[in-house]
Image (cartoon, rainbow, N blue to C red):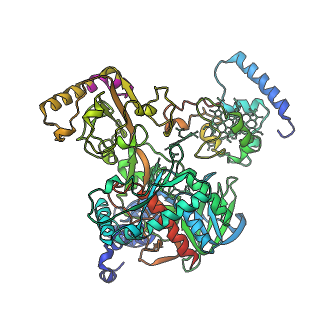
Amino acid sequence: MSKKNMQNQNESDLYTSHVLQNGISRRRFLTGAAASTGAVALTGGLASTAATAATKGSEYAMSSDGGASLEFMPKPKPIADKDIVSTQTFDVVVVGAGASGVPAALSAAENGANVAVLQKQAIVVSQGNTGSGLDLSKCDKAGVEALVNRLMADSAHRCHPDLVREWAYNSGEAVAWVIDRAKKGGAQVQNQYSKVQHGIRGLTEYKLNFHTSYFGPKPYTTGDGMRALAKYAEKQGVNFFFNMPAQQLIQDKSGNVIGVIAQSRDGKYHKYMAKKGVILSSGDYQNNKDMCNFFIPDLKNFERKQMDRTGDGFAMAYWAGGVIEPIGHTKMLHDFDAGPASMCDMPFLAVNRKGERFVNETTAMSLMNNYLRDEENAGHYSQVFDSEYMTRAKDWPGKLYDPEQIKIYMPEDPTPKKNVYPSQINTYKADTLEELAVKLECDPKIFTANVKRYNELCKKGQDDDFGKPVNKMAPLLKPPFYGIHRRMRISTLCSGMLVNKHHQALDADGKPIGGLFVIGNLGGGFYGGVDYPLTVFGLSLGRCYTFGYLTGKHVANL
Amino acid sequence: MKQLTLKNIVLSLALSVFAAGAFSADKPLLESVHKDLGLTCKDCHSSKPFNEPPVTACFECHDTKELAKETADHPITNPHENRHFGTETNCNYCHHQHKESENYCGSCHLRFKLVTP
Ligand SMILES: Cc1cc2nc3c(=O)[nH]c(=O)nc-3n(C[C@H](O)[C@H](O)[C@H](O)COP(=O)(O)OP(=O)(O)OC[C@H]3O[C@@H](n4cnc5c(N)ncnc54)[C@H](O)[C@@H]3O)c2cc1C
């Protein structure tokens, strides 16, 4: 993009111009290649390296400075027409049947479109329980704007304000719609309204109220909910194609996206033409290791929570001319399942995998991953407390589970495991600290030494090591001792392709790509911080539903 | 392969296991289980060069719905029917032919200690 264009850019759209300047796109590489030819002339000796980079560049995507070829995004191989065994035409083709794709498909169908959904996996797959939106009929506008401001601050002011407002002013309608339609498909879902939104307390003096969809209790999830919604969508005429991963986008001569090529499990190719548009909703790229290491090097040692999320949508949109947000993507690493979710932010003594205290425990669980990035810790830490925790922590934010209730999180306890994931629970009880250390897989010597030091600081009433407030210093004195061994694993990654307000992909000149829309975590601009914020509980799913709902409607009406 | 009836096959499996047992107590790789049943390379690899065959090759002989029923009472969890893939988890995630099989689910699930043939 030229300097002149940049000056014309609307002031409020600094986000877009930043991504255009620094994001990853094909156009950028073309200019990058020209620049590196200049460099060759100067340095002479590097000519051959530059030449291979240039030829490589035609096979692989390139980094934003044109310096590195990104082998995790190879150029799609041409597929000859003779290898296409079937061709079907629809108004709208949705790629990916998850939390954004299923609502998009249904919304398009309700607006009169003939819709196909291509799904990589054998069934509709998604995760989580809670998805939220604002009930505008019970909000003051100043309250909504205060929340928008807070969400932008949560994203280090690096997101696109228009997209945050798109969520803020449409999400209540969208979430209520998802609840209604999912119920019609037989889902186990309820509206929790503002009941679970503890994170917004004190945020504004103006009225703020929510529609909060809850697919649960566990082990029931949004995955089950989206399967129910898909069942209802099928009744409304939406066509689902399972085990049918999209591979490439089809473009006409002027670059408009007019269809998708997918590959069935027998290796055969199928064409799905789209008269109005293709909506990409294929989720994140956590299972593409090289891509993760490039965009978020912090992720190297963490385990994953999902499967088959190899960033296919990124590659497709990139090769169609789209722009990927620059390096430094936002990540989400949580563990709400090892012990009670409502105790995850309680500042009990926390120790790393060895057994060492490593942080001021008032740090939120969603940020703990930043202290545990190394190979040895790999996201593991334990919250530990003694049998007096019900009194010691009674005034702390959050909700305590008493010694009876917490048993559903203890694999060693025979209590029936209701409302939890039996294979993810990880809470232990022991009569001695040494025994607890072993159960938490810590070094007993290091663990007991650290507990001893912590108890001394508690007694002294001053946290000389980490500066935690004295009313949050709960010593471990009276057995039995408890430990919640949490594993911070990658739930999702939430940065993606540059889009405008209508979720239409933009090319390297900032122009919309005809027929190409991007939603869910594959869409960019909604976050921007190091970690996903938990101010609004269920923001991620709420945003997926909302943008699916809006985009389905928008594309159907084109 | 197609000319073998399932009864024959099961019988020959019983025999081959018996015979193999005489030589080694180790678990044989699936390649030898299938070979002893009379399968040839072509039953899975339809064209050269031999790459990992598509999972549909397994479906030629194995009915996934039936399998899901057979292991429905698995004491740990049903490997052939789960919330991530329904009854169609890619067999090759767990079962390997020419190398040792693996416990794919165990990488994320504590205590899912599946022993995969
Ligand atoms: C364990 C867990 C708990 C969570 N809990 C919450 C919560 O309570 N609240 C919340 O707000 N968020 C939560 N999240 C995050 C939330 O689940 C995601 O942000 C959300 O599901 C993303 O939706 P999506 O539509 O972008 O992608 P997904 O829901 O992941 O769907 C993408 C779909 O695309 C398919 N696909 C991929 N590639 C292709 C291809 N090439 N062709 C066709 N299809 C393809 C995939 O099979 C998948 O079904 C949680 C995440 C995890 C892992």
Percent from the top left, x then y, of residue A419?
49, 40
- The residue drawn where x is 17% and y is 32% is A458
Relative vertical location of residue A349 with respect to residue A148 in this rendering, above or below: above
Does the magenta segment cover residue A86? no
Task: Tell me if A18 is positioned left or right of B37 in this view.
Answer: left
Q: Position of residue A410 (x, y in %)?
A: 44, 30
User: In the image, A504: left or right of B16?
Assistant: left
Of A89 and A311, the residue lying toward us: A89
> Observer-nearest residue: A352 or A200?
A200
Q: How many marks?
A: 0
Q: Quadrant of the N terminus of chain A?
A: bottom left
Look at the image and tell me in which quarter the C terminus of chain A lies. bottom right
Q: Quadrant of residue A268?
A: bottom right
Question: What residue span does the magenta drawing correspond to?
Answer: A436-447
Please check the rendered image and state whether residue A443 is part of the magenta-colored stretch, yes or no. yes
Residue A75 visible in image:
no
Judge by depth and name the residue closer to the eye, A499 or A422: A422
Q: Is A454 placed above or below A274 here?
A: above
Residue in view at x 15 percent, y 37 percent: A463
Residue at far top of view: B22
Residue B12 position in % (x across, y down): 81, 27
The prevailing secondary structure element of the residues shown in magenta is helix
B26, above or below A293, in the image: above
Residue A523, by quadrant, is bottom left
Q: Is residue A407 visible?
A: yes
Q: Position of residue B62 (x, y in %)?
A: 74, 40
